[in-house]
Image: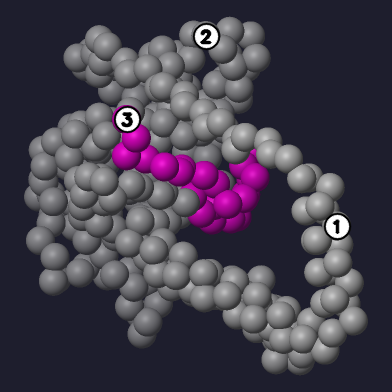
Amino acid sequence: EMEDFFKLMPGIQAMEDVEEPPSTVPNKKRKLEETGKKGPPKGKGKGKRKQHRGQSARDFENSSDLRGLVKHLGHMVLRQAEALNRLEYDTCFLLMLETKPHPGTVIPSLFKVATSWRKQKEENPAALQQSLRQVMLTCLIREVQARAELTLKTPGAKKEAERLGFLEGEAWVYQTWDPEKQHNVRDTTRKPMPLVDFNAQAERMLKYVQGTGLTRFQALKTITSDLEGQQIPFLLDVSLRDSYLHDVLLAWTQLSVFSLVGGRIRRSRIKQSQQQEQLYRMLRNL
């Protein structure tokens, strides 16, 4: 199944022209079991409950406690939102991908992959064994691996990667933002990652992606084939039932190898949403 999508990724195709890689498609794919929950049994006295709810609503409408109730519910919602923010700090990562004119952008290729997947879903849904998020992330990681291999095998590309500060010998460095220089610089606090280590992590990570480890991989902006001059953020949510996927993404934050596709990975930040800030203001004015 994945071979059809890999054909849409330029780096993967270029690597296949150099040498045919071993098949990465697993022999057996897990079948997801769908479970459903039955609703509670219907009881008697339905009319009485309706009358009770209606009476309660009239009592609140005629009571000065309605404002207090709204404030109480609002504060409960905000506490839940803050708890979710803290949870996302542990489970959520952001993948930022550049669009054109960045020479390495993969946004058009990912758009083709998504379009092809949706077409297959309409025409032959039984043939699809993986969700769209699994297919897109797999294609992206394979593309990064292919471009990294090609960079090391091509003297000119390797020299350019070293000039840009992405590569040190056979290892990919970590970068951090320098506010004074206004560009990324080498992060000397983190040891560069050899390509062999990155590939080993990627292979194991993709096995977790095929299971239940990846809970969300979603663009926060609509992607098209002709986007220009933008950064497209993708949310990467992982399950904490097994920490490996989280540990790998943590090790990949600010790793320069993703610059080959115009990307970088960073952790999610604890930040209030616009809806939270608006709710705060509304509650203060009550």
Crowd rating for badge 1 (residues with CA inside 10 Å; few <14, some 14–19, many 20+): few
Tell which tag, 2 or 1, sits nearer the viewer: 1
Q: Is residue 199 visible in the rendered structure shown here?
A: no
**171 to 67, vertically: above or below:** above
Question: Where in the figure is residue 104, as x and y percent of width and height?
Answer: 43, 43
Question: Which residue in the protein does label 3 denote?
Answer: 211
Left or right of 167 on screen, residue 258: right
The residue under label 3 is which amino acid type? Gly
Q: Distance between the residues labelled 2 and 3?
A: 18 Å
Which quadrant would the N terminus be assigned to in this image?
A: top left
Q: Is residue 213 above or below residue 79?
A: above
Residue 92, placed above or below residue 32? below
C-alpha gap between disc 2 and disc 1: 48 Å
Q: Is residue 215 left or right of residue 145?
A: right
**Colour setting:** one colour
Which mark is drawn over residue 51?
1
Which stretch appears magenta? 211-234
Report the residue marked by disc 2.
126
| Foreground of the two, 94 or 130 | 130
Q: Do the residues labelled 2 and 1 touch (CB within 8 Å)?
A: no
Q: Is mark 3 on a helix, strand or loop?
A: loop
- Determine whether, in the image, residue 19 is placed left or right of residue 170: right
Q: Which amino acid does label 2 sit on?
A: Ala
Image point 32% across, 39% down: which residue? 213
Residue 187 visible in image: yes
Residue ID at (52%, 40%)? 107
**Depth order, front residue of 12/198:** 198
Which quadrant is home to the C terminus? bottom right
Identify the mark nearer the N-term, 1 or 3: 1
Q: What residue type is labelled 1?
A: Gln
